[in-house]
Amino acid sequence: MADGKNLVGVDIGASSIKVVQLKESRKKLSVIRYGYAELPPQTIIDGHVMNAGVVTEALLKIFSDNKIATKDVAIGVYGQSVIVRKITVPMMTPEELDEQINWEAEQHIPFDIKLMSIDYEVLKKRPEAGQMDLLLVAAKKDEINDYASILREAKLRPIVVDINAFTVQNIFEQQVGLPPDGTIALLNVGAAVSTLNIVSRGVSAFTREITNAGGSITEEIRKQCNVSYEQAEAYKCGGGPTQIVPQEVHQIIQQACAGLAGEIQRSIDFFLATSGESEISKIHICGGSAYLAPLAKAIEKRARVPVELFDPLTNILADAKSTNEPELRARASQLVVALGLSLRCDKEKRQWSA
């Protein structure tokens, strides 16, 4: 855990908003407040907020209804406006790197550098070669400012901006730990985007966003069964206690999961072919659509790598007085980004300002 007070994690996803507040006591983490709100279709498209008023109202309601008094928040961003690159630069001091990073970033980012917020982390120093490896992260300032404006409209104070792929790594490292040797993959299957983060020897080595995700599966059910999007989503989730799911839905889900598994396998094959790594030992899957049994099976079959569901709440307590624990645990996989964000603190050394 970093210095300072934990921020409230706010995950504004394509289909819903998830908010989590953690507290650390006696070396144990517990969820003391959390909230969830569905968003109407098309509110968020590829990480862009299309209807700011709806998002603001939802945030105000979540914080009010769940009595979340802390207003300092960490927010996650994703989509085409976010770029992550592993780059190699000459060895230099931290002061020199701060001065030089924009020039280095210009060589790797296909946008006007003046329009981007830049951050980096030193992954490895190789003095014998006179080089160092960096993880370079860039996001469009307009996107960050749009989210920051919405948060301020909801009477919140954005303190930290993180990348969704890394928030999953944050909570996984805290809960499970990252293997010091070997390579694993963290796969977050959301509504609009599936985010793959391959972690090698404890650091992120490759990230990719795949636009095939939970919403794509719902859309296939909608088209092939000729039903509304809401009905298709209900079918995907099992229909509930009162609905019978048509037999063909199971086949549609299997086919859609096989398609997503194929894209994940191609991304893994690309990483293995370009990185020099020989294998990935395990894929840990999370996100709102991770519960679909055919998905884990399809990924395991196509990628030829063991797949395991990651529950981000396994070792985290739930405050019985202020949370509905059964509901919280039922939503665990959906809360993974918000939980990763809620590990961020208000006195960290490196953070984007929003």
Image (cartoon, rainbow, N blue to C red):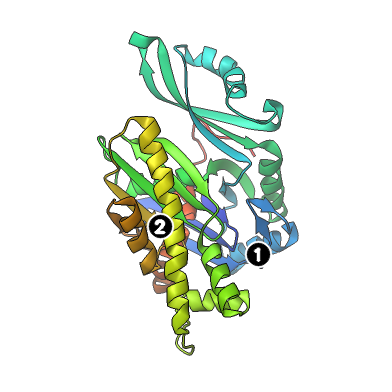
**Horizontal relation, residue 127 to residue 105: left or right:** left
Indicate the position of residue 263 as horizontal and vertical percent values. Answer: 45, 51
Which quadrant of the rendered structure holds the N terminus? top left
* Three-letter amino acid code of the residue under disc 2: Cys
Q: What is the number of the mark on residue 286?
A: 2
Indicate the position of residue 72 as horizontal and vertical percent values. Answer: 58, 48
Q: Which residue matches tag 1?
A: 58
Which quadrant of the rendered structure holds the C terminus? top right
| Residue 187 against residue 246 in the figure, above or below | above
Q: Is residue 7 visible?
A: no
**Horizontal relation, residue 155 to residue 167: left or right:** right
Residue nearest the viewer, comparing 25 with 285: 285
Crowding at mark 2 (Cα within 10 Å: few <14, some 14-19, many 20+): many
Q: Secondary structure at mark 1?
A: helix
Q: Residue at coordinates 26% horizontally, 45% vertically from top-left?
A: 281
Q: Residue at coordinates 59% horizontally, 29% vertically from top-left?
A: 118
What distance separates the C-alpha of mark 1 from that of mark 2? Answer: 24 Å
**Horizontal relation, residue 230 to residue 284: left or right:** right
Q: Residue at coordinates 62% horizontally, 23% vertically from top-left?
A: 106
Crowding at mark 1 (Cα within 10 Å: few <14, some 14-19, many 20+): some
* Three-letter amino acid code of the residue under disc 1: Ala
Residue nearest the viewer, comparing 89 with 170: 89
| Residue 260 against residue 141 in the figure, above or below | below
Q: Secondary structure at mark 2?
A: strand
- Of all residues, the one furthest to the bottom in this rendering is 242
Q: Residue at coordinates 68% horizontally, 62% vertically from top-left?
A: 42
